[in-house]
Amino acid sequence: MKRVVLILVLAIILFARIIASAEALSVCTFNIQFLGSSTKRDDVGLADLLKKYDLIVVQELIAPPYSGNFPNGKPFVPDVESRHFFDCMLQEGFTYQLSEEDTGPGIRNHLNSSATEWWVAFYRTNKVKLAADLPSGFLSPVRAHNPDFDRVPYAFAFRTLDNQLDFVLISVHLEPGPGRLNKLRRKHELASIASWIGAHNRKEKDFIVLGDMNIENAAELTNATPAAYTSLNKKCDPTNTNVNAPKPYDHVLYVPSATGNEFDQQYGFHIVNLIEEMRTRWTKISKLKYPGGPVYNHNIFRQYYSDHDPVDFKLQPLTGGDHD
């Protein structure tokens, strides 16, 4: 009898481990406009919204949160507003990886202003770990006034704790603007990213390009997307919070033949309605009228929250493990 009970216990433990290893990872990408610039930012509310995810990649962080040093040895100038957001995320149980410096289209970086931005990924250490053996970091050593990028993208490499799934997330913020030259620049940026991946995909095949691509419409997405790639937001649903000028700015690009099976296709691609999500959280920080409506005030709303919605998807390990 004891032997039967022991076998049943071991079977239950084994089954639980199989279920845990097969659990999908929830991934979010979120452009938080000029994060670190607004003293009004509802960091507590944003962290509460994001706590449900396993991994979050953020764009438009304009200053470092804590003390540190640039690659040239000069010290950071820590920013109070940036630190408050990071503190709130750490209180929700996240760890983070921050780029070693900022990047932007001007001739200088290390500015602590909206002219440049830092890259950051928040993640849960009970779900993933950094994969130092995979390609990671800035896609170019030229971080300011780069000929190929407005803001040099940054690659974050992760692996699940059971080693069943690894992947590289490339966070991007492409040149904005509706003009013909703006669109040509974005197409060149995406082509340059695809070229970098092609030069670094011998060991790893699962590269996911995600973030604010400033894509204006479906026609531009079709024209700008590199060969073999596709977007999870292929319908070009709007991802910005400006209800008067909806645009499909945010995308998740990947090569289906390499990474398609890792995406939870049943879950798909979700756009979080930031205006509705923050409505109930607003009452905790202010007695003023909510800028998200019924009369929407975009300029005020983005100071407290953002001009972009978060978007998310799920990754799942393959049967037998991920071998590339």
Image (spheres, rainbow, N blue to C red):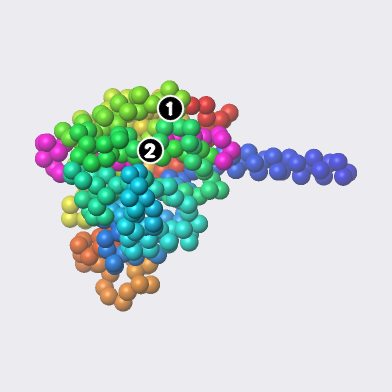
Query: How much space separates mark 1 and mark 2, taking CA atoms?
Result: 17 Å
Q: Depth check: give the residue in front, 79 or 189.
A: 79
State the residue in front, 23 or 300: 300
x and y, in percent, of residue 322 in the image: 52, 30
Q: Nearer the viewer, mark 1 or mark 2?
A: 2
In percent of the image, x 53 and y 45: which residue is there? 127
- Looking at marks 1 and 2 on the same chain, the residue that comes earlier in the sequence is marked by 2
Residue linked to disc 2: 137
At horizontal 32% and vertical 31% (from top left) the residue drawn is: 230
Q: Dividing the picture into quarters, in which one does residue 181 lie?
A: top left
Does 41 sit above or below residue 26?
below
Instruction: Identify the secondary structure beneath mark 2.
Output: strand
Q: Is residue 174 above or below residue 243?
A: above
Q: Which residues are magenta?
A: 161-183
* 276 horizontally vs 130: left or right: left
Mark number, residue 256: none
Q: In the depicted view, which residue is nearer to us: 212 or 13?
A: 212
